[in-house]
Image (cartoon, rainbow, N blue to C red):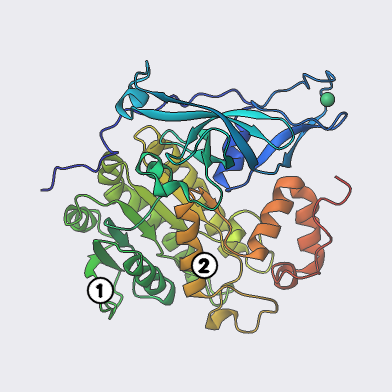
Amino acid sequence: METAMTEHAPLALPPRHRSRVALGLTRVAARGLFELPHCLECGKAHYPPQETCGHCLSHRLAWRTHPPAGVLLARADLHHAIEPAFQQRAPLRTGLVRLTGGVTLVAFIHRDCRVGDAVTASFRLDRSGAAVPVATPPGIHFSEDPALTHFAIMPADRTVLITDASGEIGRAFAHACAAAGAAHLWLGVPGAKEPPTLDRGAPLSLPVDDAAGLAAAAALVPAPDIIVNTWRFRAAAEADRDQVRSQMKTNCHDLMALWAAFGPQLRARGGSWVDLLAIEAIAADPDAPGYSASMAAANAVVRSMRAEAAVHGARVVAVYPGPLAHAANADRPGPKIGAAQLAERTLAALHEGVEDVFPDAIARDIADRAAADPKALEREIAELGGRRAFAGGSDLAPVAAGR
Ligand SMILES: [Zn+2]
C-alpha cells in the first residue's frame, strides 16, 4: 500500500478559530467573492471585520462587494513562526496591502509581488477552512506560486475518483479531470450499472448496498486526492413511490455509504471530496418535493462531512447547479447547464479554492435570494410554481429589492 503522502497531508493545520463577525470572511471566501463590511452611515469599509464603525461609531455595518485592487506597501518574508503550521511552511511571504478606498490588509503574497507594485487581493480558505487574505500581481493566479497552491484544488498529477462515471455528467467530469492532467483516474460504476467506455481511467465497481464490498473497492484506491461524487438520481415522475424512494436512497443514503468507505483515506490524505448537489438543496421546488427533500438531506450530510474533514485538513466542496440540460429536462423552460460546462466550471471553481459552487446564473440567483430573504423566496417560488421559478430569467422579482 502506498504510504507516501502528498506535501500537504502530514502538515499541522493553521489556527481555525475566528470571531462570529470574522466568520463573514469565510462565507465570502467559500463563494469566491470579495466583500468587506461597509458602514451604512459614513460608507467606510473595514478590515478586519468589526461590529462598530471605527470612523463614526455606527453599528449599522453591512457586507458589500469591494474592489480588490491595491498596492503592496511592505513585504516581510518570515523564516520563523510560533504556529507549527506556519513554521512548516516557512519562509512565509507576507505583505501589507493598501486597497483602493484605504483599507489595509496583512496578506500572504505571491512571490513576484514587489513593494510599490499594484496587486489584486482575494480571500481564500486555508487548510483549516478559515479565510485568509492573499495578494497576487494583477492577472497572475495565486497557484502559480508553489507556496500558495494549497489554497487551490487541482487534478493535475493527482489520483481522482469519479463515483459514477457511467452517466453523461460523470463522463464529462472524467474527461475534464483527464484534460487537467489527473495522474490516476478511477471511473466508478455504482450498483449494477454498465462500465463506462472511456479512453482514460480504470473502472471501479462500487457496490453501494454492500458495506464489505464497498470497503474492498475503497482499498483499491488507498490514496485518493479528489473524489467527485456524481452518483445522483432524479425521479422522472414523483407520483412513482418507488422512484421517490430510490431518489432519497441514491442522493442521501448512498452518499453516506460512500463517505463511510472512502472518507478515512481521503481525510488521511488531506484530500478533497466534491459533491454534486442541486440548487433544490437550497430552495425547494414545489413541483419536485421528493427530489428537493433528497437534495436538502444530501446537503445536510455534506455539511457534516465537511465538519469531519476540516479537522484533518481535508475539504468538502458542494456544487449546486440549476436545471441540467438532459433529456428529462427537455420540456422545462429557460436556460440549462450542460454536462461539459458543469464539469469545466466546477474545475475552475476548485482552482479558485471555492467551497460552495453555484455554476450557473439560475443557481447564483436562487442562492442570493435564499441568503437575502428565504421567506420571500419561498413565496415567490410558490406563486410562480417550480417550473417557472427554477427557469430563471425575469419571472422572479429583482433580488433583495430595497435592501
Ligand atoms: Zn461609519
Q: Nearer the viewer, mark 2 or mark 1?
A: 1
The part of the image, by quadrant, that contains residue 117 is top right
The residue positioned 33% from the left and 27% from the top of the image is 90
Residue 290: where, in percent of width, then height? Answer: 58, 63
Would you place residue 382 above or below residue 236 in this image? above
Residue 102 falls left or right of residue 42: left
Mark on residue 200?
1
Point 62% across, 25% down: residue: 20
Q: Is residue 117 left or right of residue 227?
A: right
Q: Position of residue 384 (x, y in %)?
A: 80, 68
Q: Earlier in the sequence, mark 2 or mark 1?
A: 1
State the residue in front, 75 or 278. 75
Neighbour class for label 1 at 10 Å: few (<14), some, many (≥20)? few
Where in the figure is residue 227, as x and y percent of width and height? 34, 56
Q: Does 19 sit above or below residue 258?
A: above
Is 256 left or right of 248, judged from the image as shown?
left
Residue 248, visible in the rendered structure: no
Q: Residues within 10 Å of mark 2 (few under 14, many from 20)?
A: many
Q: Would you say the residues marked 2 and 1 are in contact, meaning their CB atoms lie under 8 Å apart? A: no
| Quadrant location, the C terminus | top right
Residue 123: tell me if it is visible.
yes
Residue closest to the eye, 142 or 164: 142
Q: Is mark 1 within 8 Å of ligand 1?
A: no
- Residue 225 lies, in percent from the top left, at 29, 51
Q: How many marks?
A: 2
Three-letter amino acid code at the position of disc 1: Arg
Ligand 1 falls in quadrant: top right
What amino acid type should be assigned to the residue bearing mark 2? Val
User: Which residue lies under the disc numbered 2?
Assistant: 244
Q: Secondary structure at mark 2?
A: helix
State how far apart marks 2 and 1 are (Cα). Answer: 34 Å
Local secondary structure at mark 1: loop
